[in-house]
Image (tube, grey):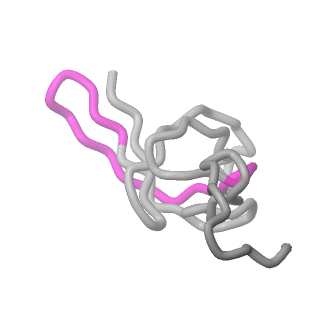
Amino acid sequence: KRPISKGQVLFREKFASLNDIKRGDTLKLIITKSGVTIAGEVKAMSNGQVGETIDVVYPRTKKIIKATIKGKKLAVIER
């Protein structure tokens, strides 16, 4: 963090963006394939923002899969 001077030009890359999902968050996962939808809970393996694809783990089987973040506490897999 540092102060901003009056008239200083601001660049997007100088700003830290806030994550919508944090590592360890429990997410609702929705999987859709051929018109069939399945929902369950997974844990995020990393931080991420809406639109990003991150690894999530299904706690019961410990299987790691990739899912796209669609909102706060929501990830999807569409096949």
Residue lying at 62% horizontally and 39% vertically, measured from the top left: 54
**Front-most of residues 13 and 56:** 13
Query: Quarter of the image containing the N terminus?
Result: bottom right
Q: Is residue 21 above or below residue 29?
A: below
Predominant secondary structure, magenta span: strand
Q: Quadrant of the C terminus?
A: top left
Q: Residue furthest right?
A: 2
Q: In screen coordinates, is 61 left or right of 69?
A: right
Q: Is residue 34 magenta?
A: yes
**Quarter of image, res 65:** top right
Q: Position of residue 40 (x, y in %)?
A: 44, 56
Q: Residue at x 65, y 75 (%)?
A: 6
Lateral position of residue 14 relative to residue 33, left or right = right
Q: Count the marks: how many?
A: 0
- Above or below, 77 against 13 in this view is above
Front in this rendered view, residue 18 or 32: 18
Residue at position x 80%, y 78% from top?
Answer: 3
Toward which corner of the image does residue 43 lie, by quadrant? bottom right
- Horizontal and vertical percent position of residue 4: 73, 74
User: For this rendering, which residue is in front, 16 or 77?
Assistant: 16
Q: Quadrant of residue 25?
A: bottom right
Image: magenta residue range? 31-47
Instruction: Where is residue 24? Give x, y as percent.
Output: 74, 64
Q: Is residue 23 left or right of residue 36?
A: right
The answer to whether residue 35 is left or right of residue 15 is left
- Residue 61 at x, y percent in the picture: 69, 45
Q: Residue furthest front?
A: 7
- Say if the magenta span includes residue 21: no
Q: Is residue 8 above or below residue 30?
A: below
